[in-house]
Image (cartoon, rainbow, N blue to C red):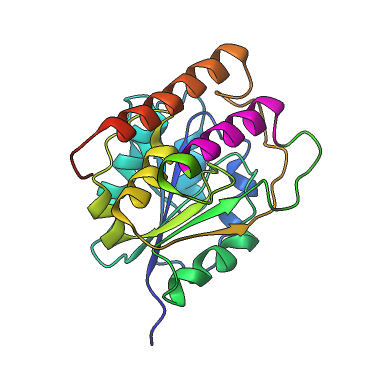
Amino acid sequence: MNEPRVGVVIPARDEAPALPRVLPFLPPWLHEVVVVDNGSRDATAEIARALGARVVDEPRRGYGQACLSGIAALSPEVEVVLFMDADAADRPEDIPALLAPIAAGEAVLVIGSRVRGEREPGALTPQQRLGNALACALMRGIWGGRFTDLGPFRAITRKALERLRMTDTSWGWTVEMQVRALRLGLPVAEVPVAYRRRVGVSKISGTLSGSVRAGTKILYVIGREALSRRPP
């Protein structure tokens, strides 16, 4: 059986200092690398191109919006979509472990769990740990999902992604994907991944207001999906 063709989507906004610690370390066998420039004011796009990535310009702000634009830009040959952040917190060395359950036919969605993996001190903030625990407890109570993290480092087959009909354009993107997979009864898995302190300051967890807005949106998405009677 041939290995699936993997395309990587990397949302990026003002991540010029971090990209040299990410793109050169991606496995050479990846089919496609797409960096989505989400309204950067620095040299994010130029550096990404210089390091061999294809750059998609998406001026509409929002993590989910950037992911949606990146998906739309992938070539038709891509069979598995890998999402990772541009801030150098995720380790490219963990990509094979993240893809393994999909290659083995055990899952169509795999979440990289920062909670179960090794973390540098301070890499995962208290508000991130609290938000993860609450969201995962709600998913377990409502749909029986056994997640420990909403980590952005994840892989999903393209066919499954199309079935989810993703719509969120901001901080609810990751939990929307997990909830909709649970609602459809898709086989999911979680693997431990290492997590480093990011380069620069997070646009979300780096500020109290950002954390509150993100947490509110995550809870909103869970509530909306729980009350929805229509399939995803």
The image quarter in which residue 37 lies: top left
- The x, y position of residue 127, in whole percent, is 65, 25
Is 26 left or right of 170, judged from the image as shown? right
- The x, y position of residue 88, in whole percent, is 63, 44
Which residue is pictured at 31% across the width and 28% down the height?
A: 224
Looking at the image, is 114 positioned above or below residue 63?
Answer: below
- The x, y position of residue 193, in whole percent, is 65, 55
* Of 152 and 38, the residue lying toward us: 152
Q: Is residue 182 visible?
A: yes
- The x, y position of residue 178, in whole percent, is 41, 46
- Find the residue positioned furthest to the top: 209
Is 113 left or right of 109, judged from the image as shown? right
* Of 107 and 100, the residue lying toward us: 107
The count of marks equals 0
Residue 69 covered by magenta stretch: no
The image quarter in which residue 103 lies: bottom left
- Find the residue positioned furthest to the right: 121
Which residue is pictured at 40% across the width and 26% down the height?
A: 39
* Of 182 and 200, the residue lying toward us: 182
From the image, give the main secondary structure of the stretch colored magenta. Answer: helix
Which residue is pictured at 49% across the width and 23% down the height?
A: 214
The C terminus appears in which quarter of the rendering? top left
- Find the residue positioned furthest to the left: 230
Q: Is residue 38 visible?
A: no
Looking at the image, is 46 positioned above or below residue 169?
Answer: below
User: What's drawn in magenta, residue-wise?
Assistant: 124-139
- Find the residue positioned furthest to the bottom: 1
The image quarter in which residue 210 lies: top right
Which residue is pictured at 38% across the width and 87% down the height?
A: 1
